[in-house]
Image: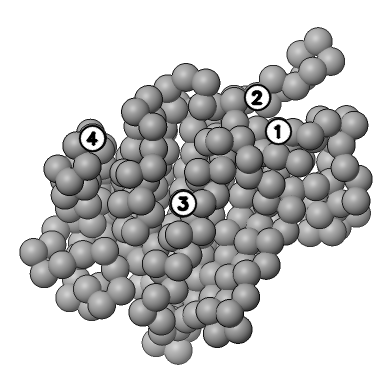
Amino acid sequence: MQLDNSFTRGHFTVTVAGCGGTGGFVAEGLSRLLPGHASLVLIDHDRVEARNLTRQNFTREDLGQFKSESLARRLARRYGRPIAFSTFPFAMVQVTTPGMIIGCVDNGLARRDIAARVKGFSTIGLINQGYVSRPNWWVDAGNGENYGQLLIGNSDEAIFEKDICYALPLPTLQRPELLAQAPPQERNCVQIAEQGPTINLALASLVLEVVRRLIEGSCPWMQLYLDLAEGTLHAVPATPGAVTRILGMKKRKTIQKGGDTR
């Protein structure tokens, strides 16, 4: 089972929401990876602080600048491609073209905004007994001290036909507890976990592999779990059976035509 990549047939946009720990490294990797007919947009309204320099993709020359602007200007010069940026919160930015949103945010409010936008512009329907799809996949990346997860989705439901997965439940449906995470300014020191110096770079590498496979049409996953302490990587394949196990038998509808029911 592979995730649908019909969005790559014309111009598409990859938007990185959150350019801090993981997002900054993702942005640089995408600058190398994306084909010429793809646009890259970076969104983050935070500024670079001294404490960011130990594990994020910034240097002292970036201090005080907006993260999205600093990255966009530096990467555009380095890789010779136009890179758009916004210094407004994601909810205030218009995202309309088909493609992907890479969520590297750390709170439920931001994820709620992404979920609303993805649901608003994914086009998945049934035409002449066949599925037509112009999905906007949402790849959500989150991490703790030495572990991280990637969740992939774009809809309220799952749609499979033969060997193609056209839709998967949104990351916030797969893991509803993500919506309860408070913004950093509302958490106390105990609630804000320390992060290891390499977890963001490791997680960014997984994000880039998922993006590469989504574009190529060879991505078979709906979830990935990385644990640097244990040295493990666990993949959850995108199958009707996996969706049922994650969401529960009666919580959401899974549409299947000739696909794997395991």
Q: Which mark is residue 133?
A: 2
Look at discs 3 and 1 and give the one toward the viewer.
3
Name which of mark 2 and mark 1 comes first in the sequence: 2
> Marks 3 and 1, Cα distance to the nearest angstrom?
20 Å
Tell me which residue sits at (76%, 13%) in the image. 127
Mark 2 in CB contact with mark 1 (< 8 angstroms): yes
Whichever of callouts 4 and 1 sits on the residue coming sooner in the sequence is 4
Q: Tell me the amino acid under the disc marked 1.
A: Tyr
Label 3: which residue? 208
Pick the residue in front: 21 or 193. 21
Quadrant in which residue 214 is drawn: top right
Mark 3 or mark 2, whichever is nearer to me: 3
Question: In this figure, which residue is indicated by the disc labeled 1?
Answer: 166
Across and down, in percent, residue 221 comes to 67, 51
Q: Residue at x 79, y 18 (%)?
A: 130
From the viewer's perspective, is 221 left or right of 35?
A: right
Instruction: State whether residue 52 appears in this view.
Output: yes
Q: Which label number is shown at residue 81?
A: 4
Compute the Cα span from label 2 to label 4: 28 Å
Helix, strand or loop for disc 1 = strand
The residues tagged by marks 4 and 1 sit, at their Cα atoms, a distance apart of: 30 Å
What secondary structure is marked by label 3? Answer: helix
